[in-house]
Image (cartoon, coloured by chain):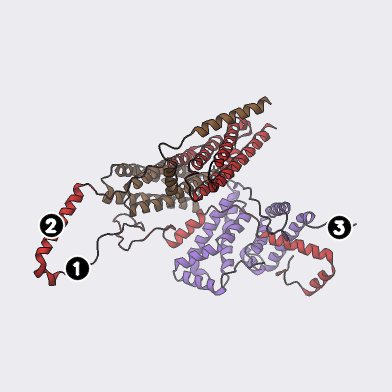
Chain colours: A purple, B brown, C red
Amino acid sequence: MVSRDAGHLPGDESGLILAAQSGDRESFARLVERYWDSLYRWLCHMTRDGHAAEDLAQETFLKAFAALDRFRAGSNFRAWLFRIAHNNFVNQRRSMRHSRQPLTQDFPETDPGPEEDALSKEALQLLTDAVAKLPADFRSALMLRAEADLSFKEIADIMGITEQTARWRVFKARQKLMTVLEPELLPPARG
Amino acid sequence: MIRSASILLIVAALCAVVGAQGPKTGLTAAQQQQLFQRNRAMIQTLVDSTVDMSTMSGDYVYRAKTYRKVIMEFQRELGSAAETSDAGRIAELGSHLDTLMRQGLAPSMRAARQQAASGTGKKDLMDLRDRTVELVDWLQDKARNQWADTPEVRDVIQKLELSKKELNESVSP
Amino acid sequence: MAVEEPANLPVELGEHLDGCEACRAWMRSYGQMNEALNRLAVPASGGYGKIAVLERVRGVPTINVSQSTNHKPIDSVKPMPIDLEDDLPKKKRQLAPFAAKYWPVGVIAATLLVGVIAWLNLRGQKPQQQTPQPSDPMLDNVVRLNVEFAKAQAPADRVEVLTKLADELNQEMREIARADGTGENMQALEQMYRKVVLQGLVAQAKQVAPAQRAAVLGPIANRLAAAKKIASETAAASPEHSAVRLRNVADIAGDGAVEIHKLIKEAAI
């Protein structure tokens, strides 16, 4: 699997963060460019609503920008950013319980990708639906792992749970998805 | 069979009507192509805004926000026109800006104001209002200093003053 | 499934997999599923949020506007980051050493200069005029349709506006098909048409109440069918780089008509 950080040197990001903390706005803008897509995607999976995801992503980056001096240099910026996003999502969910529910959108079809190793279109649709049906906490943990490539420890920090619970949630989510997908993916067992 | 024949007849009639729509008033194909080339970015932005509005028809905050890109495009085009002192272009774009502010943006913002809770939604509306008003103020100031004696520009500047008021009222409590 | 790094399995598990075909098959499927998880499609971002963030962070609009070094802030208004170039020469010439010797030349030059300025003013050349371009009917119509859409309350009204917008784009394509030398403009129009018909019109048509669908959507479907026919006919008479765009538009119109008919049929059941 190709690392999502391909092309970005590890030292490059610390340099950007330090520059941003010293007041270089352009450096923070580059961090926005770097993380916008993965954050937006994760928020889409959480909210099931592209517009809500866009608003939450915007709010997250603005809060991060305002609180940049509180970020501890040397720690994981991605995890810090996703923690802010997770808190925003949770707060929004609480407030939505008392008011109108967001319209959920039909998500576009996923491109199956290179033929040899790809899931079929039907399997991808099953997977999309199954992910959407996961309870929010399980979906959150799973997609933090899949989209943001975070460790179980980082997921635990973001969600305010223990590392063991984070691992458990990802495990249960994967187990559920495999149960749904098995009939599509695996040949029937020989009798 | 009668139904299929009727449909074919209707389609043929529509083709005749649509096909008979000649080139737009007095312009050659080459002129139209040039005009489209000049206005392509603006047209694209407006088409995007219209379709984007349709995806969240009931969400007026989102609808108002679709105008952000439109205002930015006007900013860019008016800036280019200012650099070349193109009074005709200023008047043309200013007139469209006036229409969009009064009939598109202000009503959307009025409706959005009622929907927006405090926080990002309301802040975004205020930002959009400020940006639009800033653009109009800049344009008015330039016009007074440089193009004041062009009747079209004077006319547009006056209209934009009214549009500005309407926009401000649309987000006032 | 709880392993941190699937590529680095515990030794015992690795050994088991070496000997078990069923588990290897399962592992392959598991790998496919994990691989697919971060490729699941999500709605494309509208871009507004990112633009808003970048604007606030940078403190200036994220548009490519030239900056003049001679920019003078306007008194009561926040300065726009653009200004007219100052055309006047900035260097002052040192005249003192030559003044005593060449003052008559100076007087003649000054007189000539005054005369030229007076002549220009009499011609009424201020402000600097560009070759006037006609106004663009397409831009006029697109602006008008945008505000018409903003005012439209019911799905039926919105569908009608989107159909008009689609017709406008279709007509523009037919009219410039032979004049567009590179096909770039035709491509842009095709993309807009696709967006309007498939993302706008068809999606909005789904919002029309079932009871109204036949009456509202029937004529829309017919117009799309007509647009398909005309685009195909125009393609036949156009240069190939425009013809391919017109054929695509014909397909889009056809697909749109099919979708609309499906919606009408669903409502009738």
Q: Please state the horizontal and vertical placement of residue B119, each as a whole percent of the image.
A: 49, 53
Residue positioned 12% across, 63% down in the render:
C106
Q: Which residue is mark 1?
A: C93
Residue matched to label 3: A189
Report how far apart the C-alphas of labels 3 and 1 lie in the structure. Answer: 96 Å
Chain of the residue displaying label 2? C
Q: Position of residue B156 (x, y in %)?
A: 33, 43
Q: Amino acid at mark 2?
A: Thr
SS at badge 2: helix
- In the structure shown, which secondary structural element does the residue marked by tag 1 occupy? loop
Find out whether the residues at labels 2 and 1 contact each other: C-beta distance under 8 Å: no
Who comes first in sequence, dot 2 or dot 1?
1
The three-letter code of the residue at mark 1 reads Arg
Whether pointer 3 and pointer 2 mark residues with C-beta atoms closer than 8 Å, the reply is no
Q: Residues within 10 Å of mark 1 (few under 14, many from 20)?
A: few
Q: Is residue C45 left or right of C75 when viewed as pictured?
A: right
Disc 2 versus disc 1: distance between alpha carbons? 19 Å
For disc 2, the marked residue is C111
Please give left or right for residue B55 compared with residue B99 in the image.
right
Number of other residues with Cα within 10 Å of mark 3, as a class: few under 14, some 14 to 19, many 20 or more: few
Chain that bears disc 1: C
Q: CA distance from mark 3 to mark 2?
A: 105 Å
Residue C11 in view here: yes
| Foreground: disc 3 or disc 2 | 2
Residue C95 point in image, percent of width and height: 15, 69
Q: What label sits on residue A3 in the rendered view?
A: none
- Looking at the image, can residue B56 be seen? no
Q: Secondary structure at mark 3?
A: loop
Q: Do the residues marked 3 and 2 share a common chain?
A: no
